[in-house]
Structure formats: structure tokens, C-alpha cells
Amino acid sequence: MELGKAAAAMETGPENSVRPFFARHAVLLFYVLVLALVLLLGVLVNAFLGVTGTGTAPSTPADLSPAMYGVAVLAGPASYTLAAVLTTTLAFGAAGLRDLGARLIRWRVGVRWYAAALLTAPVLMTTTLLALSLTSNAFLPGIITPEDRASLLVAGLVAGLLAGFFEEIAWTGFAAHEIGRRHGVLVTGLLVALPWFVLHLPLWVPADTGTVPRALSVAAIVPWFLAYRVLMVWVYTHTRSVLLAILMHVPITASGFILASPAMVGVPDVVYNLILGAALWILVAAATAADRRTPAARRGPDRSGVPLEGGGPRRGTREP
């Protein structure tokens, strides 16, 4: 009896009374931590610039040393990962971290999902550019023109791997996983994509060609950015593999290095982004239609016995 009372007291201790609150509001807590860490990162960068005597932020990557450029590129994604790990710890404890780790290394999924993850972006982007290049040389893929193609490929792959690893632990491993417990693929994708897009705005807002309004250039990116995240959520929903999400992130980042042409600015850039966005949304519609034709019993990871852990079983599914 005494042991039973002691166990009950432990279960109602401060940690166990706070954790359910964090678990209920885990997604909100994650976004708050992401915002706080990004703001803190900005303060630290400004403080660093003040200490070094520059006093102003560098206007281009060329203004930074290679080491500082690497730190600047990784700082944002690393802060997302930190927010995901902190939220998982606060909301779900060690069990949540183990589940996140298991999904991070889950590789035994169908070959078709590897094909979807690795080929969707490069095939669609290359096809779009080659088709548009029939109207203007501005659309020729960037990999065709430079002499040092090897360096361009390596830079793109390294950037893609690093960004994919750090970002997808957060956006897929935590955000999409938790939001997906209550919503379908489309809503989950949009709820993850919108803050993901906002945090990437600094990559595009400074670019101003003067030939088209800057707002139009940025707005043209929105359709494909949202659609690609929805497709990432679709792949994750069927595989529960964060590793696959990382692999799907790699080509969309790497292709920005490898396929982008310096001549594709202004109107050509807007045209390309809008057409790419339309093509990706067609794929989203096709994926949605395919899921509707597939019986629920054969859809998703549950038919292979993959547990849906972290904050409890997903609605409409059985616990393993």
C-alpha cells in the first residue's frame, strides 16, 4: 500500500503535472521557441558585428569568410533543431526523444518513396527549365554553362545535406508529425509550410533586380514552396521516416545551386517559379486523388505495424 501511494505521488509530481500541459500545446511551444531562438540569433549576430568593429551586416555572402558563411548558413536550421529537441523533451520526455531518433533513422520503406523523395524536385525543375529554354537562353540550367561543374555539384550537395538534416528534424520530425495527428496532409503541409516560408524570406527579399517589383518576385515563390512542403508531408505520412524527409529536402536545396542560372532574373525568374508551382500543385492533386482511391486499410505506415509515437496514437488508428 505504501509503495502504491509513493508511486501515485510520483506520478502527480511537478514534472508530471507540467508535461501534459506542454504536450497539449507542443506545436505552439515549438513555434514560440523557434521565434525566440531566431530573434536571439539576430541579436548575437549584431553583437558579433559590433565587437568585430564592422558595425553593419554583410550585404553579400562574399563579405564573409568561408567559416563565417558556413556558420551563418547553419545557424538558422540548427536553431530549428534545437527548438524541436527542447519541445520534445518538455512535452514527451525521454520516450519522445527515443521516438524522434527512431523515425530519424527509419530507412526500410518502399523504393517508390525513395524515388519520390529524390527525383521529384530535380526532374520537375530540370524539365521546366529545359522546356522554357526553348523560348529564351535565360532558362538554360546553370550547370550547363560553368567550367567548374564539380565544385558546383559538391557545393549544392553539401548545402542540401546540411540544410536538410537540421531543418527536417524540426519541420518534419516534430512539426509535421504533431500537426498530422489532428489534420490531413494538405492542412498539415500548409501549417508547416507557412512559417517555414516566412523564416526563409531573408534569402529572397534582398534580391532586387529592378525589372519587376520585389514583392512580385517573392510572391511567385510561394506556390511551389507550399506545394513542395505538402508533398513532403504526404511522403512522411506514408513512411514515418524523417530520414526520407531529409533526402527529399536535399534536392530542392541543391538544385538551387546547380540549376539556377545568373541570367534568370526578373521576368524569367517569375515565370519559372509560377510554372514550377503549378506543376507541383498538379502533383499534389494527383497524390490526393491516389490516396482517395486507395482503401484506408492499405494506406500509410500503419499497415506495416509502424507505431505512431510521440504524443500518443494518431486518431483513427490502432496502437501497436
Image (tube, rainbow, N blue to C red):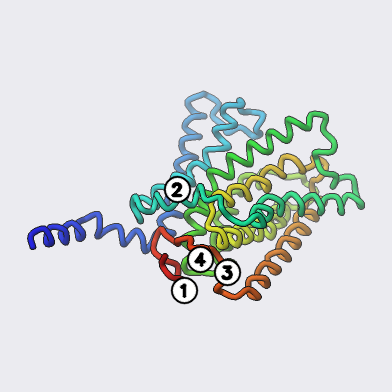
Tell me the SS state at disc 1: loop
Image: 37 above or below 47: below
Asked if labels 4 and 2 touch by Cβ distance under 8 angstroms, the answer is: no
Sequence order check, earlier mark of 2 and 1: 2
Label 2 and label 4: CA atoms lie apart by 19 Å
Farthest left residue in view = 2
Image coordinates of residue 315 in percent, x first then y, are 45, 71
Q: Secondary structure at mark 2?
A: helix
Mark on residue 29? none
Q: Position of residue 13 (x, y in %)?
A: 19, 57
Observer-side mark, 2 or 4, equals: 4
The kind of residue tagged 2 is Gly
Pointers 3 and 2 in contact (CB under 8 A)? no
Q: Is residue 121 above or below residue 67?
A: below
For disc 1, the marked residue is 316
Query: x, y percentage for residue 62?
Result: 67, 29
What is the number of the mark on residue 101? 2
Crowding around mark 1 (Cα neighbors within 10 Å: few <14, some 14 to 19, many 20+) is: few
Q: Quadrant of the N terminus?
A: bottom left
Q: CB atoms at circles 2 and 1 under 8 Å apart?
A: no
The amino acid type of the residue labelled 3 equals Arg
Residue sitting at 54 percent across and 47 percent down?
A: 167
What is the total number of numbered labels drawn onto the structure image?
4
Which residue is the site of mark 3?
A: 299
> Label 4, on which residue?
302
Q: Is residue 26 above or below residue 75?
A: below
